[in-house]
Amino acid sequence: MLLAIDIGNTNIVFGVYEDRNIIDYWRINSDSYKTADEYGILFREALKSANAVIKDIDHVIIASVVPPLTAVIKRMTQRYFKVNAFIVDENTKTGVKIGYENPKDVGADRIVNAVAAYTIYGGPVIIVDFGTATTFCAVSKESEYLGGVIAPGIMISLEALFQKTAKLPKVILELPKTVIGRNTITSIQSGIIYGYAGLVDEVVDRIKKEMGGDPYVVATGGLAEMIVPQTRNIKEINPMLTLEGLRLVFEMNNG
């Protein structure tokens, strides 16, 4: 079985595959202060909840944008699963040509997202990932990663609004009944949700204009369900995109 792990700044998402089928997946908080042992216990308990046999994990693949956590999770997989993890980087065989000026600058999550999106939807395709940052990635018809856009993430913006203003409260992010807020909380909710929906549509429109053609637009990430219904450009939410990309990359490098 394959254990696929996506290490982000806010969350670690991991799933276990048997052949090409995912058995289950989980999302936990990223915490650089946790030890390899603490993560080992968390991972083992999660896998047990899906009736996965720990000793059957014979491969691990990791995409990470948090180097300190990469080392911790690598140690965890060695100790608790007896497996040396395969780490995705700019030199990994993916079938996608990186068109960035410096390929090392492209996050591993964006690489595997591009692989999955191109494999599933073909090209051209645009991926919008609602993570710690809101990222946009453009992949051409010829499977070239052209580049993208990085904007502050939704929760970063919400937290900054609370921290940098004297009177605005911290709010729970949920869809208000009207765009025009009738109180401070609904005004903030409206500004974040509809503001980001507008940001997404405007950026996608501009990317489409530069790419030409009619790229398919797919979204992923923890907050996609909140924002995507308010947009006009995104065709589909695929919460499994990154894990599927990891599985595909693993198969390319271990065929």
Image: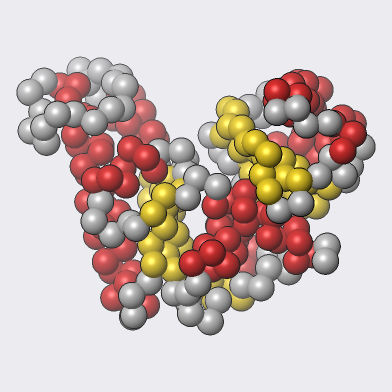
Check the picture and name the quadrant holding the N terminus.
top right
Task: State the image quarter where residue 4 is shown.
Answer: top right
Foreground of the two, 22 or 156: 22
Q: How many marks?
A: 0
Residue at (80, 52) in percent of width and height = 86
Residue at (18, 29) in percent of width and height = 176
Check the picture and name the quadrant holding the C terminus.
bottom right
Residue at (61, 75) in percent of width and height = 97
Q: Measured from the top left, where is residue 133 in percent x and y?
A: 44, 45
Q: Measured from the top left, where is residue 137 in percent x and y?
A: 46, 63
Q: Measured from the top left, where is residue 99 in percent x and y?
A: 55, 75
Task: State the image quarter where residue 169 is shown.
Answer: top left
The colour scheme used to paint the residues is secondary structure
Instruction: Work out whether residue 105 can be spotted.
Output: no
Q: Measured from the top left, where is residue 21 in percent x and y?
A: 68, 48
Foreground of the two, 64 or 234: 234
Residue at (50, 72) in percent of width and height = 122
Q: Is 56 positioned to the left or the right of 10 in the image? A: right
144 vs 89: above or below: below
Instruction: Work out whether residue 244 can be spotted.
Output: yes
